[in-house]
Amino acid sequence: GTKIATALATAQGEILARGRRSTPAQAGPDAVIKSICATIDKTLSAKRVEPSQLLGIGIAAAGIIDGDKGKVISSPNLPGWHEVPLGDAVEQRFGIPVYLGNDATLAALGEWCFGLKKGIANLIYITVSTGIGGGIIADGKLYTGACGVAGEIGHMTIDVNGPKCNCGNIGCWETLASGTALAREAVKQIREGAKTSIIELVNGDISKIDAKVVDLAAKQGDELAKELISRLGYYLGVGLVNLVNIFNPELILIGGGVAKTGDLLLQRAIKVV
């Protein structure tokens, strides 16, 4: 939900060019779609490629996706995204086929097709960033469920007394183990008077606190930041235990910006599992 990332790639998965910019999420769907198209344009221009030379455009978006209709049904972390025809809008702009799918589901498919463990029969891919999403490969096939929306693992309940989620549920996994959760807990602790270098890293502006800032503070030895990341790792592990018991995967892959926090997060999660 925080960034738009593009890649120009061959059918064999070789990446020729990349693009990236922040998502103007608060400006609404139209502004985001315009930004997506501009990022695609810039990426193509880097290699002087025309849209007509492409086989198609694949869009991986967060939230509940209807790929057949090219719509984002809902996206809890993007304000105003309800029944947004993202696929159709981009297809009309570039005049070539567009495939729209859930970001974590397509990431799982990408790992299965091109990753280090490509072809493995049973795996789960988890993305831990603004929220938490997942994609499931079961018996060598992408599992999408009855309505095509399987893998919304970030919205399984972890704590019935936990925070309210943007989806309306209480105690969802992503309210406790995502980048948003990490930043929220840091702000809460600071407002309650906790001593930490986190506030210095944002020059006193708590609105600028995000997962990256907390991670930086932890790497600099800040005790509160390390405690918060360890707590996040605990809740990450609780969710992983559920997935292991339900799906019995051969492999779980964890990606997303928060995963870059590294050992402090992952070792705590592994200990729980």
Image (cartoon, grey):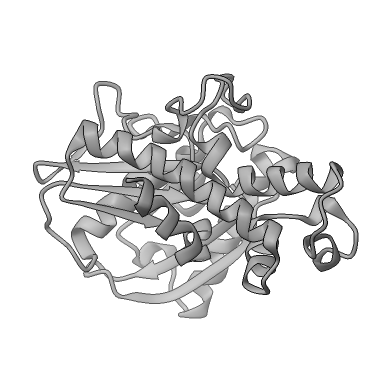
Q: Is residue 99 visible?
A: no
Query: Residue 17: percent from the left, percent from the top?
Result: 44, 76
Indicate left or right for 69 with 185 as reference.
left
Residue at image point 34% right, 42% down? 240
Q: Is residue 200 visible?
A: yes
- Judge whether 137 appears above or below 270 on screen: above
Q: Extreme right residue here?
A: 204
Indicate left or right for 135 with 210 as reference.
left
Query: Residue 175: percent from the left, percent from the top?
Result: 57, 35
Q: Nearer the viewer, residue 148 or 246?
A: 246
Indicate left or right for 261 with 113 as reference.
right
Q: How many numbered marks appear? A: 0
Residue at image point 59% right, 26% down? 162
Residue at image point 29% right, 37% down? 243
Query: Residue 153: percent from the left, percent from the top?
Result: 39, 34
Query: Residue 156: percent from the left, percent from the top?
Result: 42, 27
Q: Nearer the viewer, residue 49 or 169?
A: 169
Residue at image point 25% right, 41% down? 136
Indicate left or right for 181 with 154 as reference.
right
